Image (cartoon, rainbow, N blue to C red):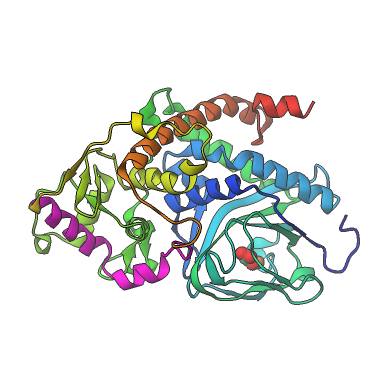
């Protein structure tokens, strides 16, 4: 217990499993937007609701609950805390933060405790990004996937993070408050009531994401008004995996006649995936749909329990025609204006090492089938949980196995 120590803090190794870390990375890499600080990307829970992906809240629920219990136990404030904020945050090259406490602004005074869960690892996935406390021990935290750091948000724990020099450093970050008026759950429940839940019928279409406006995915954010330089972060994530997009709706092969922002609208509509000189005949509803399936394939599919037999899935892939190649190249020029910058900020450090990405269409097709089952199962779970959340005014894990375990 933290009791009266001078610098109340705790590091827990391997608190999150490898599967938890991979699942949260999958969510971040498919849903994040440009963040609130330079070179930072973020995924908030309200953003998931706003983009018709409320079912993607479900993987957070048991993790949030476990973290809250741990914070309350260690800092000796059982049943006193509410979650103030939950978000996935990633820092890329150039991002850093100097000495500060997490409650150091008048509008942050409600923050009592901070929790940072590291979802990927120093030196393996990114370079730089060490966490430092100004005083007390431990003084330096080396981020490693699965480790969790907890500390009080006041001046007893002044800290900084070294600049990221390479790769992308991803965390699940939460703050907790004693002030019930800052309860994130209440806001999310109300947002869910107004939003997606009426729409979330038991048909598959309800689980398809709806993108936010294009400027929210444009890097750097300052260029998101004109789209004349920089890049779309979603296209950059596909590009690092050797994948491109084709727009079956684009009958216009002369980009000079269309403005960038008009062409960006194509990301809101039907798209197909291209790899080298082949085109996948599956038509995705929009760019978020493409990205969710591809990131699922990279992060979640290799770990899913019921991996279906790849051979049983039909894969329809055709060679690209000349016109299709032009379409693909034209879109690349518009969405990845600054290709070098995209490759610098969005890159996978550890490709070539243990998580080598060996793309093949048959596995992607199998992952697509699994992604559909995964989203439908989360949607079901959300529909079952929501009435309980609403009745209690809080978001908690209502799954039967969990409740039985706790008896
Ligand atoms: O990501 C971290 O290790 C800490 C980040 C931090 O200090 C903050 O967001 O206030
Ligand atoms: Fe901080």
Q: Main secondary structure of the magenta part?
A: helix
Residue 183 magenta: no
Question: What residue is at 49 percent from the left and 61 percent from the top?
Answer: 353
Between 302 and 108, the one nearer to me in the picture: 302
Does residue 344 appear left or right of residue 16 in this picture? left
Give the position of the N terminus as an image quadrant: bottom right
Residue sticking out furthest to the front: 311
Question: What residue is at 38 percent from the left and 27 percent from the top?
Answer: 204
Q: Position of residue 219 (x, y in %)?
A: 37, 66
Q: Is residue 210 visible?
A: no
Q: Is 238 above or below relative to 135? A: above
Residue 327 magenta: yes
Question: What residue is at 45 percent from the left and 53 percent from the top?
Answer: 29
Between 223 and 170, the one nearer to me in the picture: 170
Classify residue 352 by image quadrant.
Answer: bottom left
Q: Position of residue 151 (x, y in %)?
A: 75, 61
Classify residue 161 by image quadrant.
Answer: bottom right
Give the position of the C terminus as an image quadrant: top right
Q: Is 367 above or below relative to 224? A: above
Q: Quadrant of ligand 1?
A: bottom right
Q: Position of residue 406 (x, y in %)?
A: 77, 29
Q: Is 372 above or below relative to 222? A: above
Does residue 47 appear left or right of residue 262 in this picture? right
Does residue 386 appear left or right of residue 175 in this picture? left
Give the residues in magenta: 323-351
Between 107 and 56, the one nearer to me in the picture: 56
Residue sticking out furthest to the right: 4
């Amino acid at each position: 217990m933290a009791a009266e120590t001078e610098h109340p803090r705790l590091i827990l190794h391997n608190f999150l499993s490898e599967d938890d870390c991979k699942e949260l990375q999958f969510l971040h890499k498919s849903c994040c937007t440009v963040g609130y600080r330079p070179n930072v990307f973020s995924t908030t829970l309200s953003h998931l609701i706003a983009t018709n992906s409320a079912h993607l809240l479900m993987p957070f629920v048991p993790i949030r609950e476990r973290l809250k219990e741990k914070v309350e136990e260690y800092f000796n404030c059982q049943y006193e805390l509410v979650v103030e904020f939950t978000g996935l945050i990633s820092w890329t090259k150039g991002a850093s933060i100097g000495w500060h406490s997490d409650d150091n602004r008048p509008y942050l005074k409600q923050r009592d405790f901070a929790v940072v869960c590291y979802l990927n690892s120093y030196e393996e996935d990114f370079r730089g990004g060490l966490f430092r406390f100004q005083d007390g021990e431990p003084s330096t935290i080396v981020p490693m996937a699965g480790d969790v750091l907890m500390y009080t948000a006041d001046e007893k724990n002044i800290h900084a993070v070294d600049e990221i020099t390479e790769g992308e450093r991803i965390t699940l970050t939460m703050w907790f408050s004693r002030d019930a008026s800052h309860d994130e759950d209440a806001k999310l429940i109300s947002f869910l009531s107004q939003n997606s839940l009426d729409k979330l019928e038991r048909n598959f279409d309800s689980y398809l994401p709806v993108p936010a406006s294009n400027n929210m995915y444009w890097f750097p954010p300052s260029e998101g008004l004109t789209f004349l330089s920089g890049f779309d972060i979603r296209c950059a994530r596909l590009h690092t995996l050797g994948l491109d997009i084709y727009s079956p709706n684009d009958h216009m092969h002369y980009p000079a006649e269309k403005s960038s922002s008009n062409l960006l609208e194509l990301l809101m509509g039907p798209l197909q995936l291209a790899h080298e000189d082949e085109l996948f005949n599956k038509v995705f509803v929009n760019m978020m749909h493409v990205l969710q399936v591809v990131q699922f394939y990279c992060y979640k599919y290799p770990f899913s329990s019921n991996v279906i037999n790849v051979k049983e899935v039909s894969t329809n892939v055709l060679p690209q025609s000349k016109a299709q190649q032009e379409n693909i190249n034209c879109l690349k020029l518009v969405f990845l204006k600054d290709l070098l910058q995209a490759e610098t900020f969005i890159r996978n450090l550890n490709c070539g090492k243990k998580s080598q990405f060996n793309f093949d269409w048959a596995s992607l097709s199998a992952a697509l089938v699994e992604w559909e089952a995964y989203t439908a199962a989360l949607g079901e779970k959300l529909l079952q949980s929501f009435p309980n959340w609403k009745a209690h005014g809080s978001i908690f894990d209502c799954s039967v196995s969990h409740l039985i375990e706790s008896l």
